[in-house]
Amino acid sequence: MEKLAVLALLFAGRFAVAADSLPPLVALTASPAEGKRIFAEREAGHCVLCHRVAGLDAPFQGNLGPALTGIGSRLTPAQIRLRIADASRLNPDTIMPPYYRREGLEQVAKPYRDATVLGAEQIEHLVAWLASLEQADGE
Amino acid sequence: MRLWLLVVLVVNQASAETRSFADRPDLSADAVQSGRLFLTEETRALQADDFANPGYLWVERGGELFSEGEKSCAGCHAAAGDRSLAGAATRYPQYDAGAGTLINLEGRINRCRQRYQDQPALTYESQDLLALTAYVASLSQGLAMDVPIDAEAAAYFQQGRAYYFQRRGQLNLACNQCHDDNWGKRLRGDTISQGHPNAWPAYRLEWQTFGSLHRRIRDCDAGVRAEPHEPGSEIYISLELYLAWRARGLGMESPGIRR
């Protein structure tokens, strides 16, 4: 039992991960509208490079990652957050970049060292928008 | 208990390191497809038309440089005969005993300039080196890429292969994750290619100019927010060797047109 507790602690690692979810990175009133903007805009998250959301007003949405139409019906906000922050904690081989991780990266270009791809607040906005997507919204 | 803890710590440490996919197989030779097939119809047509393809401006300039000077390239390398350069580009990069290192076509041209032509080496990515490289590469158009990776080249090959399969940059991506695992899928409006070097040096639409394979690789590194290496660096020449071998059998297309 003691061994199990130690094991859980050690594998919790850089931030507290309960099973496959992650609690909010920062306390704020998240804005789904802002999250939607971050999802689509090239200068922000530009998630549409790889992901598609039916009904979203953005041309040429990518298909490298899974479609996120109705993702709010399939995953909880905490599950969505973990997948954005560091999906490699679920699948070490994932192609999904870690949007909230600084450690264990190699050859990072100078302007990006010691920074995360997105800020905690941006991720909270994104989570709020994605969690609001119901299957009925599209497809 | 203490020993057990240590074991867990070591395992945990290892899992936090960046992942190398070097245990993965190479792209299957049956699957190899030129990047040309991932372009739009219009771009393919532009590449195929020798008069419209802007890369031929560099090929033509290279042809002039090839014949210029007292000790010209053409003085040794006649269009026909033993020293003809038809097919030469298909076998680069290759190990050069004189240089004691792996060199690519640009390196070979600079070695010739210094050893046989009493000329200084040209700067990597300079217009003259691009032009000469384009001209020599164009002499191999349609011929299959065929680099040796044995003997002295083997260690460079392994170095290049390791680079290809290593995650890097703030986006933590390895080359194989796009170009082996996901070619054919779409990044917004673009289709991901297999990342072959057979059209380079090439005219890149995004640059609105002609450039080297190493400049293109730098853009990939920068794209995953990794610190790029210098064009002409050993690591990029080694990667070029791995890419050339991976594309073995593909016909050379330089001067290509790429996105």
Image: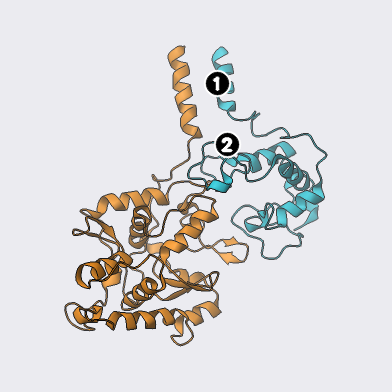
Chain colours: A cyan, B orange
Residue B235 point in image, percent of width and height: 36, 52
Q: Position of residue B39 (x, y in %)?
A: 52, 72
Q: Looking at the picture, does residue B205 appear above or below residue B60?
A: above
Task: State which quadrant residue A77 falls in.
Answer: top right
Q: Is residue B249 left or right of residue A72?
A: left
**Could you tell me the amino acid type at mark 1?**
Leu
What is the distance, in whole Å, between disc 2 and disc 1 at their CAs? 15 Å
Of all residues shown, which one is farthest toward the bottom?
B51
Give the chain letter at badge 2: A
Write the residue at 80% across / 46% down: A132
- Residue annotated with mark 2: A89
Instruction: Report the disc number at residue A7.
Output: 1
Q: Which image quarter is the N terminus of chain A in? A: top right
Chain for numbered disc 1? A
Q: Position of residue B51 (x, y in %)?
A: 46, 88
Residue A45 vertical position relative to residue B208 in the rendered view, above or below? above
Q: Classify residue A103 as left or right of residue B121.
A: right
Mark 1: secondary structure: helix
> Based on the displayed image, in which of its 4 quarters is residue A62 positioned?
bottom right
- Tell me: residue B47, above or below residue A110: below
Label 2's element?
A: helix
Query: From where the camera sits, is residue B29 visible?
Result: yes
Instruction: Mark 2 vs mark 1: tell me if same chain.
Output: yes
Residue depicted at 52% across the width and 55% down the height: B222
Residue B91 appears anywhere in the view: no
Q: Which mark is residue A21?
A: none
Residue type, numbered disc 2: Arg
| Neighbour tally class for label 1: few under 14, some 14-19, many 20 plus, Cα within 10 Å | some
